Image: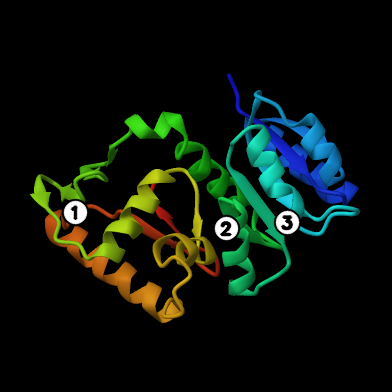
Amino acid sequence: MSKAILIIEDDVEINDMLRILLCQNGYQTISAYSGTEGVLVHGKEISLILLDLMLPGRSGEEIIRELKQKHNVPVIVMSAIHDVNKKVDLFSLGADDYVTKPFHHEELLARIAARLRTGADMKSEEIYTYKDIVLNRSSFLAQCGGTELELSRHEFALLQMLMENPNRTCTKSMIYDTVWDYENSADDNTLNVHISKLRKKLKECNPSEEYIETVWGIGYRLKK
């Protein structure tokens, strides 16, 4: 059964765009155009909420906790605000993730997939495989071609993120938020260095295979 996503967005065009995008990718959707309406239609059939921050009447910030109290599912906030402190405040209110407008469709879909996997279904998923790579997220161990990889914390988190999203592009902003957790030190150069080191370590284990490809201007993904 496909997951149901509640879209709380007052802009009709954006709401329709999100509804079409999600339906095309196998999700069911319910649309609401205000915070009050969103709380009213939120129920146990909802698996995730996309919440616009700037809503008429009651803002998204006001209704996050109310949504969580009614039925606790992941809430991804959508907003044009770039202020890191603002994002941290939203997490303290109960938001699970944040995407900055305008966003790439691939990034939003990847964030949705990642948040849905952090629910009950993901608790039993400790091991990820891709080609000849095996990653155990609970024991912090990874192997490639039968050889154990010696990875730094960020390298392991980067590889895990790519393997958790095998069919999607991980955008740079998503990688910064997830792997570096909003650290100020994260930038393009830092990411490029870590990708280069990770590729080198994988190549040393299996020189004949390519694992990570660059999507220029957007981010990285596993090579199909």
Q: In this image, 58 relative to 193: left or right?
A: right
Gap in Å between the C-alphas at discs 3 and 2?
A: 10 Å
Q: Does residue 14 appear left or right of residue 152 in this picture?
A: right
Q: Residue at x 81, y 32 (%)?
A: 40
Q: Which residue is mark 3?
A: 61
Q: Are marks 2 and 1 in contact (CB under 8 Å)?
A: no
Q: Which SS class for mark 3?
A: helix
Q: Nearer the viewer, residue 39 or 119?
A: 39
Whole-number angstrom distance, CA of label 2 to CA of label 1 = 43 Å
Q: Are marks 3 and 2 in contact (CB under 8 Å)?
A: no
Total marks drawn?
A: 3
Amino acid of disc 3 = Glu
The amino acid on which the numbered mark 1 sits, given as a three-letter code, is Ser
Front residue of 172/7: it is 7
**Res. 208 mark:** 1
Residue 223 seen in render: no
The answer to whether 103 is drawn above or below residue 18 in the figure is below
Q: Residue furthest left?
A: 147
Who's the residue at 15% across and 54% down the image?
206
Picture coordinates of residue 56, whole percent (x, y): 90, 54
- Label 2: few (<14), some (14–19) or many (≥20) C-alpha neighbours in 10 Å: some
* Residue at far top of view: 1
Q: In front: 223, or 220?
A: 220
CA gap, disc 3 to disc 1?
A: 50 Å
Q: Earlier in the sequence, mark 2 or mark 1?
A: 2
* Picture residue at 40% right of the left edge, 34% below the top: 122
Q: Secondary structure at mark 1?
A: loop
Q: Looking at the figure, which quarter contains the N terminus? A: top right
Q: Residue beneath label 2, please?
A: 91
